[in-house]
Amino acid sequence: MTAAGAGSERITIRKCEGIDELKACVAMQKEVWSFDDADLVPLRIFVVGQKIGGQVIGAFDGNELQGFAFSIPGERGGHPYLHSHIWRCARPGAITGWGAASSWRKEKMPSSRALS
């Protein structure tokens, strides 16, 4: 899925794959929010989150991460769901349509799904 982005004709929205892309998510928290290391969601949590059914969805300009969203699986009242732990961490102005046009969120990060 693609969306408009500043300085770029297209931003590609897809799952983050591999350690390098997850490391970029950790670095982006520090860059965008000026978090101290103790406040960052660490790399190991991104890895574990994906392994247990969570999702890390990235917005890419070519191969460069411009923003991401992170969800972890949960269960409440017998119903599985994905908790949006970090909904939008993005460089200012990098993804102009991300917040307004969130149809990709429904496609890539459904609010509930079967969890094993």
Image (spheres, helix red, strand yellow):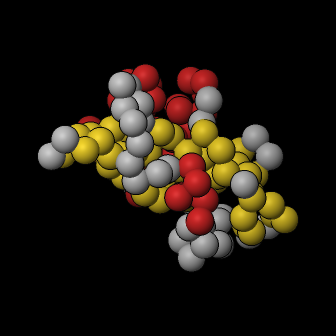
Identify the image quadrant of residue 33. Answer: bottom left
Q: Is 112 displayed left or right of 77 in the figure? A: right
Rendered view: 45 above or below 70: above
Q: Residue 95: where, in percent of width, then height?
A: 65, 65
Identify the image quadrant of residue 98. Answer: bottom right
Q: Residue 90: where, in percent of width, then height?
A: 54, 58
Q: Residue 110: where, in percent of width, then height?
A: 47, 51
**7 or 106: nearer the viewer:** 106
Residue drawn at x 50%, y 40% as measured from the top left: 56
Q: Is residue 92 at all visible to an observer of this figure?
A: no
Q: Residue furthest left?
A: 77
**103 or 79: nearer the viewer:** 79
Q: Is 6 displayed left or right of 42 in the figure? A: right
Q: Residue 55: where, in percent of width, then height?
A: 47, 39
**71 or 7: nearer the viewer:** 71
Q: Residue furthest right?
A: 9
Count the marks.
Answer: 0
Q: Is 98 displayed left or right of 42 in the figure? A: right
Q: Quadrant of the N terminus?
A: bottom right
Residue drawn at x 72%, y 64% as measured from the top left: 3
Residue drawn at x 35%, y 40% as measured from the top left: 72
Identify the image quadrant of residue 92. Answer: bottom right
Q: Residue furthest bottom?
A: 100
Q: Is residue 83 at all visible to an observer of this figure?
A: yes
Residue drawn at x 61%, y 59% as measured from the top left: 104
Q: Quadrant of the C terminus?
A: top left
